[in-house]
Amino acid sequence: MPVDMDTIVSLCKRRGFVFQSAEIYGGFGGFWDYGPLGVELKNNIKRAWWKAVVQEREDMVGLDSSIITNPRVWVASGHVALFGDMMVDCKVCKKRFRLDDLTGDRCPECGGELTEARKFQTMFKTFVGPVEDDAAVAYLRPETCQSIFTNFVNILNTARKKLPFGIAQIGKAFRNEITPGNFIFRDREFEQMEIEYFVYPHQAREFHQRWLEERLNWFLNLGMRRENLRVQEHEPDKVHLRSGEVLRGNAKRVNDVVELMTPDGTQTIPAEEVVAIEKGELAHYSPQCFDIQYNFPMGWSELEGIANRTDFDLTQHSLHSGEKLTYFDPETNEHVVPYVIEPSLGVDRCFLAFLLDAYHEEQLPKEKRTVLRLHKDLAPIKVAVLPLARNRPEIVAMARKIAADCRKRWSAMYDDTAAIGRLYRRQDEIGTPFCVTVDHQSALPADPKYDGKVTIRDRDTMQQIRVSADQVVNVLRQKLED
Ligand code: ATP
């Protein structure tokens, strides 16, 4: 049974994954706070991503750039002129909607008449310096990738990479979304994990496919179920020719020609040969884009976008800054403007998808259990140490020592606040892969069954093994790190 959003929202609040921002003041739409378990899960997601796309690859390096930057960046990127959504307001109930969310021409809430659609700039504005005038306007970045382009030459010169190579960045992004919602799916403040992968133009199609597979495998390797993921290609524009032929790509009419951008380059078609242009859904700079979608409770929706951005961004920044943003090819002695493949993933959306995917309710012989089957690398707490009796100093001492040893390597929790069955259920519900239980037999030499061993319980199988107390860390190391 797929889990509904309310169940996940309630689990997140109850267990300390995610809270509304400023909940005591009624919250703040589109802003969220990550609690003790949430911050661990979020960090683990980011770590797993960084490991896969930077640490384990020779062709990738990282960047951490500022959130606010020179506003000319957003003019060059097209965001000042183009970034935003078409919105309409209901004249009766005053609610505001994104035009592309509406199916009819009346208000979906009250049936009232709607205003004309207007462009809504979704970049947050602020002022830099003491004077609040137009010259001081700056923006909170709506995506992390632009500073990768503005740092392209710096990184090329310092990291000494050859094409193809990529730059990765994790960081906050801000969008004044008209309709934030679906919990942390659409926020006004969120985090992105973005890669700009620079290639020779003729390699763009091949590396686009490779990154699509690479990114899909990342989700699968972290345990996401294949049936909950699918790939959708953005519908390209279709150029209908007089000859009956239909060409696909990103089409733009310029005077008496149609320029058709395709993954293999731009074609110029005389306008008289064109009968019609059918607009698709590609962004203006991209000839091809894939979305990895997840089957969220509200339906299939974008989890990660993987776009071919061509040389659009480097060319724009070069034009606007007057700086040369090219790669010198030592073999041909030519300057090349690389093409860019961009896999772009939201941390918060990814967090939600991993939680939804991991959530299971199971009927056991005597009770129901809720278990988060999170991959061990993502689980917020790796080990919980549970003393069976808190009034026996020997048991407490052994359990505390094991917890302290575990903490040196992993996030570990010590919990003695309930009966053991309840403690197991709690850990299952937050996805802790292993519980270590210390009992009389483990720690009391006077006990007739004394063996100095403790129990390690596996979250998924609920199987228990007994190992010597001094071997716990070694055994867990094999289970958690190999
Ligand atoms: P949408 O069509 O859903 O608004 P988008 O196509 O504008 O998304 P991109 O600009 O491609 O999104 O952003 C890349 C990724 O950043 C998305 O795939 C998503 O994971 C994440 N993302 C974008 N906007 C938001 C948001 N408002 N809240 C949370 N994550 C977001």
Image (tube, helix red, strand yellow):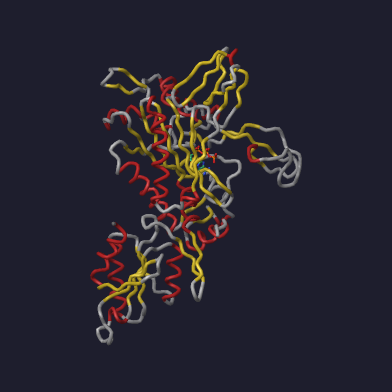
Seen at 30% across and 71% down, the residue is 400
Residue found at the far front of this picture? 244
Front residue (pair 187, 235): 235
Q: Quadrant of the N terminus?
A: bottom right
Viewer-proximal residue among 379 and 396: 379
Horizontal side of residue 91 vs 387, given as left or right: right
Residue 44 image point, x, y percent: 38, 52
Figure check: 329 above or below 398? above
* Image location (x, y in percent) of residue 237: 56, 27
Residue 251 point in image, percent of width and height: 54, 23
Total tally of numbered discs in the picture: 0
Q: Residue at x 43, y 77 (%)?
A: 419
- Residue 185 or 212: which is nearer the viewer? 212
Q: Nearer the viewer, residue 209 or 33?
A: 209
Which quadrant does the C terminus fall into?
bottom left
Residue 151, quarter of the rendered image: top left
Asked if residue 57 lies left or right of residue 229, the reply is left
Quadrant of residue 448 within the rendered picture: bottom left
